[in-house]
């Protein structure tokens, strides 16, 4: 301990390490280093040139009452330490490995500069009440690092209390938890833990929580936390790890103030696999308590309430289902259905599995898997079963709403379900996005814009949400604003082809057909057959019938291989001026209940508004008042 007292800050090769403050800098720039690598570096610097044994590291990082795959955890921590230092296992400059023995710090330490005459006292690191230092060599230093750097190992330890930061925390992002299971195949499980904690925190109305869609891109990223927080516009960041051993699951989480990169709180929790839902809620409740956010009475009850156990295998099937559903392709949606069905077979009372099944079935027509008459009744039945089991499940209300307006054309019922979903989970970014799409469909465009903007606040980097925001601006005739928003979206990911279709709609609204066609052609070039009808329409209205007819032939060929809505054929015929053929295809879409209702309610079909047959079709779909007939 004498070395730690005489050298509270260590300097070597341009690095400066302050264990008491929990900070590592390189040439004055802060280096992001997670808790366990930070502790190992502290141990090594306490005894430079000496061997720190594997057993000493085990006692420091994973005491006897903690479960972990030690070899996997240690190798991962050493690798992260070397990555931060720019070191190499083969040609080490700083950390030398002694096989089967331990590790040694081999770089020369620099003498500290003379101490100033008066030193302002540094605030003491945060220490939860009741925390006791362990009695292994160097425990005091490493405990300080653990507290400042974000690891407190306890199976049922007390939580930190009291004000943690000078500025209140009103927004945060939960970064993807790190997989410490040692098995990359467990990523779905770790991602599920991240999603669950995010969802629980998003139910707190006084807190803006960034959705998983926007934080996923930071998985494994080495960006400094203040930079991530700036990009997401949040006050704080939550980082964490997930490990498993047998039937036990452990989550270690830490809360970091965004502006200063200061660690404010940290804790570890573990439970049996069948109690994993309670574990997730416990972590979320601890974070809410740590930041002292004001909870409403219903939020307090929910956070404090008991969570029913779930069959562990059923829950894992559910997580796999959501993992594949999030990929949004025909193949992965089929896989998702299989996993959701397995989850239901294992635990018929697990409501989220039914909601997931509903979401997967509801995408089948758009993805060309199956026609609506085959998939949508299954989607509705699954959503209603989820609500029968748990009518407080926000995602199930949103699932049902999607079926009600897209297939049943129950516009009022869908509105009620969307509103109920957002009452239950006001921070549900996907819920706000889906409601915005519904509102555009029923031509309540100002409300749709407000919902799309709220969705973007909750998920600023979501490609889908930014695209829907652009579409809402298009529907309001604010074309230049829409183009600016969509071009910024392409800066996030220029390969996201859905943006090009919406960009084409904006150019079309301005009457700039060359740019509209260029955008449509970009999407088709990106492999999206869903743009064939819109590009065919553009070719038709700009006097290029040959190209439009070629796309009709492509649609016909595609329809022999996968499902294509009759509405797609109607769109191309409308561009060619074939009004009778367009109406005939729309009647087929009506008989098959196969409308893509957002596109159907758009300005394109206004060209038919004076047609008595079209007016009758709108009445049968209960959409007549949209066109003021």
Image (spheres, helix red, strand yellow):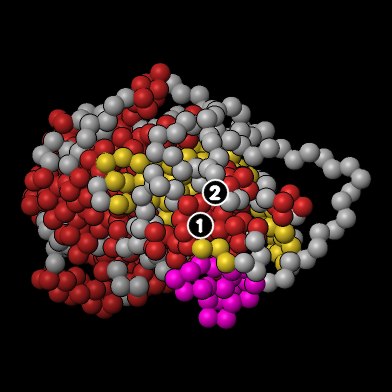
Name which quarter of the figure residue 17 lies in: bottom right
Name which quarter of the figure residue 188 lies in: bottom left
Query: How many C-alpha atoms fall within 10 Å of the one at disc 2: few (<14), some, or many (≥20)?
Result: few
Q: How many marks?
A: 2
The residue indicated by pointer 1 is 56
Q: Quadrant of the C terminus?
A: top left
Say which residue appears at 65% left-offset and 58% top-offset: 46
Q: Is residue 104 magenta?
A: yes
Q: Are marks 2 and 1 in contact (CB under 8 Å)?
A: yes
Say which residue appears at 29% left-offset and 46% top-offset: 248
439 sits to left or right of 262: left
Q: Label for residue 136?
A: 2
Say which residue appears at 23% left-offset and 77% top-offset: 550
**Residues drawn in magenta:** 87-106
Q: Name the dominant secondary structure of the magenta segment.
A: loop
Instruction: Say which element carries label 1.
Output: helix
Q: Label for residue 332?
A: none
């Amino acid at each position: 301990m004498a070395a730690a007292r005489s050298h509270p800050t260590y300097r070597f090769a341009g690095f400066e390490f302050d264990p008491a403050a929990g900070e590592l800098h390189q040439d004055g720039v802060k280096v992001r280093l997670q808790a366990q690598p930070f502790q190992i570096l502290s141990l090594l610097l306490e005894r430079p040139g000496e061997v720190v044994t594997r057993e000493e590291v085990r006692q420091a990082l994973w005491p006897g009452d903690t479960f972990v795959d030690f070899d996997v955890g240690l190798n991962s921590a050493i690798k992260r330490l070397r990555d931060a230092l720019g070191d190499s296992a083969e040609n080490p400059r700083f950390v030398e490995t002694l096989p089967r023995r331990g590790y040694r710090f081999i770089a020369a330490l620099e003498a500290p500069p003379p101490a100033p005459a008066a030193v302002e006292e540094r605030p003491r690191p945060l220490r939860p009440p009741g925390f006791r230092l362990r009695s292994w060599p160097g425990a005091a230093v490493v405990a300080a690092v653990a507290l400042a750097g974000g690891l407190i190992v306890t199976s049922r330890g007390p939580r930190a209390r009291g004000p943690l930061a000078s500025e209140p925390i009103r927004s945060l992002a939960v970064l993807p938890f790190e997989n410490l299971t040692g098995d990359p195949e467990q990523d779905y499980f770790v991602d599920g833990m991240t999603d669950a904690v995010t969802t629980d925190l998003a139910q707190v109305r006084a807190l803006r929580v960034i959705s998983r869609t926007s934080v996923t891109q930071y998985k494994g990223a080495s960006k400094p936390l203040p930079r991530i927080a700036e990009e997401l516009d949040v006050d704080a960041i939550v980082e964490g790890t997930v490990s498993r051993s047998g039937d036990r699951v452990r989550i270690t989480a830490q809360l970091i103030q965004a502006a200063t990169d200061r660690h404010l709180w940290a804790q570890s929790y573990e439970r049996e696999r069948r109690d994993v839902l309670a574990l997730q809620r416990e972590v979320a409740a601890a974070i809410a308590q740590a930041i002292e956010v004001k909870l409403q009475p219903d939020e307090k009850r929910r956070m404090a309430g008991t969570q029913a156990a779930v069959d562990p295998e059923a829950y894992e099937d559910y997580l796999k289902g959501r993992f594949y559903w999030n990929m949004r392709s025909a193949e992965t949606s089929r896989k998702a259905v299989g996993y959701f069905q397995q989850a239901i077979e294992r635990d018929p009372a697990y409501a989220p599995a039914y909601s997931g099944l509903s979401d997967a079935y509801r995408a089948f027509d758009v993805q060309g898997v199956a026609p609506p008459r085959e998939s949508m009744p299954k989607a509705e039945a699954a959503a209603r079963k989820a609500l029968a089991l748990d009518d407080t499940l926000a995602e199930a209300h949103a699932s049902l709403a999607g079926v009600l307006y897209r297939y049943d054309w129950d516009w009022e019922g869908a509105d009620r379900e969307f509103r109920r979903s957002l009452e239950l989970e006001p921070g549900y970014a996907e819920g706000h996005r889906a409601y915005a799409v519904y509102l555009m469909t029923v031509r309540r465009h100002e409300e749709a814009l407000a919902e799309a903007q709220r969705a973007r606040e909750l998920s600023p980097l979501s490609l889908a949400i930014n695209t829907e925001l652009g579409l809402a601006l298009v529907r309001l005739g604010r074309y230049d604003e829409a183009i600016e928003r969509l071009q910024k979206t392409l800066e996030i990911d220029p390969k996201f082809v859905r943006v090009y279709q919406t960009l084409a709609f904006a150019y079309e609204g301005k009457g700039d057909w060359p740019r509209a066609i260029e955008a449509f052609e970009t999407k088709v070039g990106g492999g999206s057959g869903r743009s064939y009808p819109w590009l065919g329409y553009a070719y038709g209205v700009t006097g290029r019938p040959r190209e439009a007819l070629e796309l009709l032939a492509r649609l016909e060929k595609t329809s022999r291989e996968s499902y294509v809505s009759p509405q797609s054929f109607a769109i191309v015929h409308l561009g060619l001026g074939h009004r009778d053929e367009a109406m005939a295809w729309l009647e087929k879409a009506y008989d098959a209940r196969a409308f893509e209702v957002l596109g159907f309610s758009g300005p394109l079909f206004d060209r038919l508004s004076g047609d008595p047959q079209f007016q009758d079709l709108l009445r049968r779909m209960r959409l007549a008042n949209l066109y003021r007939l």
